[in-house]
């Protein structure tokens, strides 16, 4: 084997086995246990210590995390800017409401929500498969405005501008009107969604998405089915958003058109970009931002600050820190490790 | 259908407003290859500032000039502070950054002034005459006249003057333009400033017909982008005519299907057009060249 | 342990531990609010939001956006009344604190704000409110949490009945109001066609039902244009009304939107006779849009500010001493809401919500001067049943018929 | 098609409007050899490469791999058949690791269905193991083992060039087309690249087409060379002979080397 004397920068030896490298650097057993323990703590703290109101907020964070994970796949990984992520949340929420108010079981609601989101996602994705950039953003914006118009003009079905009172979600023993159960009802699907996106990271489909985001030319040259990859990303995002909307409705007990309008879609984008468009942890940080920060600013008496800070952060983080806050934290931690 | 001339007159006036604003969008796109979601808000800042200053006692004309000045400086600042720092390989980043500015500018204005909507001085919208069975106000006439004058003026500047050729050179290839001594940065920021002026004129005209608040220009901007997409952003006359056509189309839809029909009519159009119109109209990704 | 099996391990571990937690969760287990039972007043029990020195009340109303005029007035009126009561020693030895949050006339924001008031700030009861669509957004939540609401200004056929036992209304719903308004228009004018422009949803539908009840069998055509809150461009609606050619246009929109529509109608050259809900009787509306509303007939829910009724006179002097300004119609509305809430707090035997409900049900024939006599009972939540009629002449309100009971 | 097909081009024409980038080109690229494509700027080198890979539409003539006519095949179909290319300006996933960038090159090999991948159905671990082994093999051969988990944007330019080459080679293609792979490398880097490509070619045995300016590199790396000038073939044969022919020198240096200065 020829000795390679290429001028490779002298890098600190990463703990990697000599011969076959894994997909991701394998961490030592101690690190693995640390991560697992940390995760359990984060999950257990709200359940044990939070008062009812903040436990309810934690449940909403979990529901929103599924929507931001969907946008993480569509925008963060595949680079497709959609301004209709909240619209698909609305489709899921109202499907759940219409079926729930007619006495259908939660499982039936969930299946219907996934079906409606898939169909809605396909209807939007297929005709726009050649579009990207501004054109895709404009079409998704138009779909959102049409959805809002339909909601307002179907008052007897959806409650129109008045909004709709959604029966709290009851799945087996878990009744969403009790905050702890609401937290669990939001958390379990969110963990499944998180595992799915983490798993996506280790599949060829995940890599196709990243290549489509970074260079469609290279994607063509390696034989990646670009259109199919975009559609799969779009459908994943719309189903994730549909389920998130359904859970939001079931937990919040009330849905109305402004919850799913253009600004809601923009704030979902703010969340994903601030958290870190490509990182799963970033999607959760973004979801927490969307739910908790408005409450804080309202408590401070200046609700308008949420839009102000959101706008400023979206512009700044997108420009200066492409990997978002989580990315910054990781590189800071890495730098600390390197100097320590 | 009685009042057809009224519907057409209203449509053409609205279309001229879209065309005037689209001219700003086209100039900016040619020079910076960027679409700014915050462009509507720049116009809103002009009108809202003018309203606030006027409400505080300053005469209307001075208030309008002040508002326009703020808008011009703001749009130029957006180019200098944000747009210049967008790395060319990050496709679509201009949308995300300007979406952030869209939210930021609205929130700042709500903080400085308020989040209510206010009625704007009529600027001649109430003094009307009936021409060919349609009620035309002074405001309408000014808008249409201004649109015709400004658009043809811009056409002449672009096609016949050295400034025009410099602009087009910048659009084609900034590096080559820079190599021939054109100060590309100054020209770009200057174009953004002119676009700011156009946006403030349109925003004031729209405010005089409707009302002014922090978000009233959003739907106008979306329709302007739609017209730009239909006509093609790298051309001149087709998109501007598409803008006027969109105004008439919208006005006809409202007249025939009632007030509620405006929103769906426009947005169904954009989905149909964008999904069908071939992609070559707009070079979205800068790496289109193999 | 390769990477892939490890992450599956995490998921399984997380699931088992959270299920285990479900068993041992503490305070957050029961439903957040106890179910309200009218008869269960236990004087010893102390409800949320009450301490030995303070009673915390809450409400949401539009303090920004197109409905701001109404919300700001009601807030001023309530705070002025509570300040007067607190200066005089409060109620049963406790000061009253009211926390009023902005809901921008939007059901979704109202619902979020009310959840914060009830679950986070732990208010004892809801003191009044302004605007129907926003309040209707919080009603399901208040019912679930068992929080009583006193005299919210949210006229609607969905409220004021026993299927919403927590909501004690003190205003006639829009079906009655527009029924009476249309009757008084028909008494004095020859009407061929009526166009109604109303806030889309329950408010507009109620107004339309009221008009149709009044014109039943009289061969008068009625058409209805729904307006989505937040509309800024009224030219399309104005031109649609003009092509409809009605000689009377009835309006039930927020103050700012009503002004916007009247301006647009003037611009397209359409000037029919107009009539509207009681919001147009407020001074801020008259000041800004009075010139556009010449001859407009307006329903009246509260007494005329210039009335010589001693109780109204006392209100005027009290309000001026508290705020140093003359009251407007919405100030008057806020003042009476606080007055009714305080009356219930004075009467309640114990400071738990069931006791407050019992006190409210004991209030029959309460004379405030501002509203017609207010009366509730174990199965009566309507409160009042009277509407007056006024007319706008050169930007000032002239009372044609005082607020008299519909039934008498 | 064999593991290293010959590429036979018959009067190939590629025109952009009136401009003919390649005109009536007829040439046989020998199977299983490393072939250099040389010529001044604008000679049509990259256009030839684009035509073979399907990125540019062919106005006339034919391209055969062994006996199979491919000029009408889509890019994706050609890639599936093993015709894989690199780019003049490196196109990688900048914020991803070297391993991810190399693994994506296995796209053209049999991959489980989208649904199977999404749900992690059985059959995944086996194909993942196979992909990882292939990636590790080429990473080791190109000396990138030390930086396998580093983000590409943290690597020096030379290593990033090698990562793209690794992505091209990982699926063991039958035809490899590289567009100025040594551009931007210093002398040592060029020699190293030539050594690596020669060694990989010797082991894998594919037909390799390298568009390159550097005369020394072509002579060191290529077993055969084609010289193009404004769309025409002006010389063909072993690199030393090609660079000796007067027409090539005129095209390259503006005059014949041995003519008086």
Image (cartoon, helix red, strand yellow):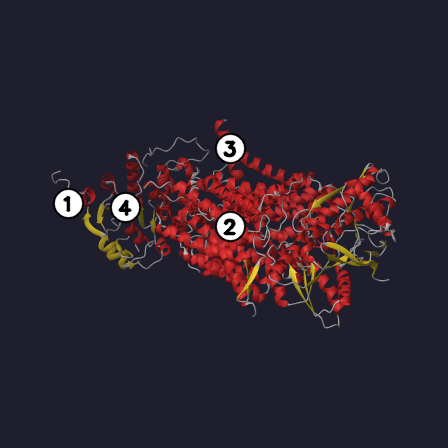
Which residue is more in the foreground, A317 or B67?
Answer: B67
- Most extreme residue toward the left is D260
The disc label shown at residue B201, or none:
2
Q: Is residue C147 visible?
A: no
Are both tags, 4 and 1, on one chain? yes
Q: Secondary structure at mark 2?
A: helix
Are both tags, 1 and 2, on one chain? no
Residue D91 in picture, x, y percent from top left: 38, 44
Mark 1 vs mark 3, CA separation in Å: 60 Å
Q: Chain of mark 3?
A: A
Residue A306 in picture, x, y percent from top left: 61, 42
Q: Is residue C390 visible?
A: yes
Are both tags, 1 and 3, on one chain? no
Mark 4 vs mark 1, CA separation in Å: 21 Å
Mark 4 vs mark 3, CA separation in Å: 42 Å
Q: Identify the residue at image location x=19%, y=50%.
A: D234
Q: Secondary structure at mark 3?
A: helix
Q: Identify the residue at image location x=74%, y=67%.
A: C189
Q: What residue would you read off at disc 1?
A: D246
Q: What residue would you read off at disc 3?
A: A332
Q: Dots 4 and 1: beta carbons under 8 Å? A: no
Between disc 1 and disc 2, the foreground one is 2
Give the left or right position of residue D226, taking residue C159 as reference: left
* Neighbours of disc 4 within 10 Å: few (<14), some (14-19), many (20+): many
Q: Chain of mark 2?
A: B
Mark 1 vs mark 2, CA separation in Å: 67 Å
Q: Earlier in the sequence, mark 4 or mark 1?
A: 4
Quick one: quadrant of the N terminus of chain B? bottom right
Are both tags, 2 and 4, on one chain? no
Mark 3 vs mark 2, CA separation in Å: 47 Å
Q: What residue would you read off at disc 4?
A: D211
Q: Chain of mark 4?
A: D
């Amino acid at each position: 084997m020829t000795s390679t004397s290429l001028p490779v920068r002298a890098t600190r030896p990463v703990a990697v086995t000599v011969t076959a490298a894994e997909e991701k650097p394998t961490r030592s057993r101690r690190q693995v246990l640390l991560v697992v323990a940390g995760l359990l703590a984060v999950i257990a703290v709200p359940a044990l210590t939070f008062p009812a109101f903040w436990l309810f907020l934690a449940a909403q964070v979990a529901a929103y995390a599924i929507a931001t994970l969907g946008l993480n796949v569509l925008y963060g990984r595949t680079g497709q800017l959609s301004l209709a992520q909240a619209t698909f949340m609305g489709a899921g929420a109202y499907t759940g409401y219409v079926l729930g108010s007619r006495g259908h079981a939660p499982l039936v609601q969930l299946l219907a929500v996934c079906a409606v989101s898939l169909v809605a996602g396909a209807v939007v994705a297929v005709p726009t498969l050649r579009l990207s950039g501004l054109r895709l953003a404009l079409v998704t914006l138009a779909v959102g405005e049409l959805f809002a118009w339909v909601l307002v003009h179907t008052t007897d079905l959806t409650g129109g501008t008045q909004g709709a009172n959604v029966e709290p979600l009851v799945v087996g023993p878990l009744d969403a009107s009790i905050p702890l159960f609401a937290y669990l009802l939001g958390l379990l699907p969110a963990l499944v969604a998180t595992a799915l996106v983490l798993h996506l990271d280790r599949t060829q489909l995940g890599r196709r998405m990243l290549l489509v985001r970074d260079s469609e030319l290279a994607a063509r040259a390696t034989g990646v089915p670009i259109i199919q990859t975009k559609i799969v990303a779009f459908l994943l995002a719309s189903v994730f958003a549909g389920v998130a909307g359904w859970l939001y409705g079931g937990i919040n007990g009330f849905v109305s058109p402004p919850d799913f309008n253009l600004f809601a879609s923009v704030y979902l984008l703010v969340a994903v970009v601030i958290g870190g468009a490509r990182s799963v942890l970033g999607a959760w940080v973004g979801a927490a931002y969307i739910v908790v920060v408005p409450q804080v600013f309202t408590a401070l008496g200046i609700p308008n600050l949420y839009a102000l800070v959101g706008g400023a952060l979206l512009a700044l983080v997108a420009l200066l820190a492409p990997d978002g806050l989580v990315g910054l934290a990781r590189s800071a931690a890495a730098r600390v490790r390197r100097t320590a | 259908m009685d009042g057809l001339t009224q519907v057409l007159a209203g449509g053409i006036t609205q279309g001229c407003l879209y065309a005037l604003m689209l001219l700003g969008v086209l100039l900016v796109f040619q020079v910076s290859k960027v679409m700014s979601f915050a462009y509507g808000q720049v116009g809103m800042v002009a009108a809202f500032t003018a309203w606030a200053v006027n409400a505080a006692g300053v005469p209307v004309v001075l208030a309008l000039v002040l508002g326009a000045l703020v808008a011009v400086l703001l749009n130029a600042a957006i180019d200098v502070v944000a747009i210049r720092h967008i790395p060319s390989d990050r496709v679509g980043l201009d949308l995300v950054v300007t979406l952030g500015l869209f939210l930021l500018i609205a929130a700042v204005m709500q903080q400085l002034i308020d989040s209510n909507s206010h009625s704007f001085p009529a600027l001649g919208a109430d003094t009307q005459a009936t021409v060919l069975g349609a009620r035309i106000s002074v405001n309408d006439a000014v808008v249409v006249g201004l649109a015709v004058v400004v658009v043809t003026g811009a056409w002449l500047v672009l096609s016949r003057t050295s400034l025009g050729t410099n602009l087009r050179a910048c659009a084609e290839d900034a590096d080559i333009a820079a190599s021939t001594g054109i100060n590309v940065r100054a020209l770009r920021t200057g174009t953004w400033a002119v676009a700011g002026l156009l946006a403030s004129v349109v925003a004031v005209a729209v405010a005089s017909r409707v009302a002014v608040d922090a978000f009233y220009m959003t739907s106008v901007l979306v329709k302007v982008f739609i017209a730009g997409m239909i006509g093609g952003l790298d051309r001149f006359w087709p998109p501007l005519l598409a803008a006027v056509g969109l105004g008439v189309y919208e006005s006809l839809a409202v007249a025939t299907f009632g007030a509620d029909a405006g929103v769906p009519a426009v947005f169904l159009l954009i989905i149909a057009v964008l999904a069908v119109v071939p992609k070559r109209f707009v070079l979205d990704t800068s790496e289109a060249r193999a | 342990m390769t990477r892939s099996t490890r992450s599956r391990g995490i998921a399984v571990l997380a699931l088992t531990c959270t299920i285990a937690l479900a068993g041992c969760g503490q305070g957050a287990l029961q439903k957040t609010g106890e179910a309200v039972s009218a008869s269960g007043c236990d004087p010893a029990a102390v409800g949320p939001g009450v301490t030995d020195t303070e009673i915390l009340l809450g409400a949401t109303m539009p303090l920004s956006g197109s409905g701001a005029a109404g919300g700001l007035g009601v807030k001023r009126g309530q705070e002025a009344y509570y300040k007067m009561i607190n200066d005089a020693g409060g109620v049963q030895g406790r000061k009253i604190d009211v926390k009023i949050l902005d809901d921008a006339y939007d059901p979704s924001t109202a619902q979020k704000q009310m959840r914060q008031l009830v679950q986070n700030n732990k208010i004892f009861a809801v003191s009044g409110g302004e605007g129907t669509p926003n309040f209707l957004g919080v009603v399901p939540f208040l019912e679930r949490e068992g929080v009583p609401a006193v005299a919210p200004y949210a006229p609607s056929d969905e409220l004021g009945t026993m299927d919403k036992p927590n909501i004690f209304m003190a205003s006639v719903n829009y079906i009655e109001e527009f029924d009476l308004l249309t009757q008084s228009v028909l008494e004095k004018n020859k009407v061929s066609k009526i166009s109604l422009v109303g806030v889309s949803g329950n408010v507009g539908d109620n107004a339309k039902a009221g008009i149709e009840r009044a014109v039943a069998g009289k061969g008068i055509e009625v058409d209805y244009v729904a307006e989505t809150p937040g509309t800024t461009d009224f030219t399309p609606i104005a031109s649609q009304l003009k092509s409809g050619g009605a000689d009377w246009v009835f309006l039930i929109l927020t103050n700012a939107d009503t002004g916007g529509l009247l301006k647009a109608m003037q611009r397209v050259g359409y000037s029919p006779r107009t009539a509207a809900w009681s919001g147009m009787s407020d001074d801020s509306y008259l000041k800004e849009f009075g010139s556009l509303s010449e001859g407009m007939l307006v329903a009246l829910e509260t007494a005329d500010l210039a009335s010589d009724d001693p109780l109204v006179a006392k209100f005027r002097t009290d309000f001026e001493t508290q705020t140093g300004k003359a009251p407007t119609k919405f100030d008057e509305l806020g003042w009476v809401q606080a007055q009714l809430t305080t009356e219930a707090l004075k009467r309640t035997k114990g400071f738990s919500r069931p006791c407050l409900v019992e006190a409210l049900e004991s209030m029959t024939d309460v004379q405030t001067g501002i509203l017609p006599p207010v009366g509730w009972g174990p199965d009566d939540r309507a409160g009042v049943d009277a509407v007056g009629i006024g007319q706008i002449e050169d930007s000032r309100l002239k009372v044609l018929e005082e607020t008299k009971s519909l039934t008498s | 098609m064999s593991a290293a097909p010959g590429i036979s081009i018959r009067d190939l024409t590629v025109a952009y409007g009136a401009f003919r980038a390649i005109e009536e080109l007829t040439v046989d690229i020998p199977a299983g050899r490393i072939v250099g494509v040389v010529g001044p700027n604008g000679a049509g080198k990259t256009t030839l490469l684009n035509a073979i890979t399907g990125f540019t539409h062919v106005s006339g003539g034919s391209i055969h791999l062994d006996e199979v006519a491919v000029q009408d095949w889509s890019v994706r179909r050609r890639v599936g058949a093993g015709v894989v290319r690199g780019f003049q300006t490196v196109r990688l996933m900048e914020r991803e690791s070297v391993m991810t960038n190399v693994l994506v090159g296995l796209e053209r090999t049999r991959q489980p269905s989208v649904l199977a991948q999404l749900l992690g159905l059985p059959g995944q671990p086996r194909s993942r193991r196979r992909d990882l082994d292939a990636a590790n093999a080429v990473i080791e051969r190109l000396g990138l083992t030390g930086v396998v988990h580093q983000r590409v944007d943290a690597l020096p330019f030379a290593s990033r060039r090698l990562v793209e080459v690794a992505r091209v080679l990982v699926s063991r293609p039958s035809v490899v087309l590289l567009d100025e792979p040594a551009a931007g490398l210093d002398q040592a880097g060029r020699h190293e690249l030539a050594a690596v490509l020669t060694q990989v070619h010797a082991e894998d045995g594919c037909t390799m087409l390298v568009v390159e300016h550097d005369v020394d590199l072509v002579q060191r790396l290529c077993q055969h060379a084609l010289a193009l000038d404004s769309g025409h073939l002006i010389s063909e044969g072993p690199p030393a002979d090609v660079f000796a022919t007067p027409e090539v020198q005129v095209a390259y240096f503006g005059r014949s080397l041995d003519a008086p200065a």
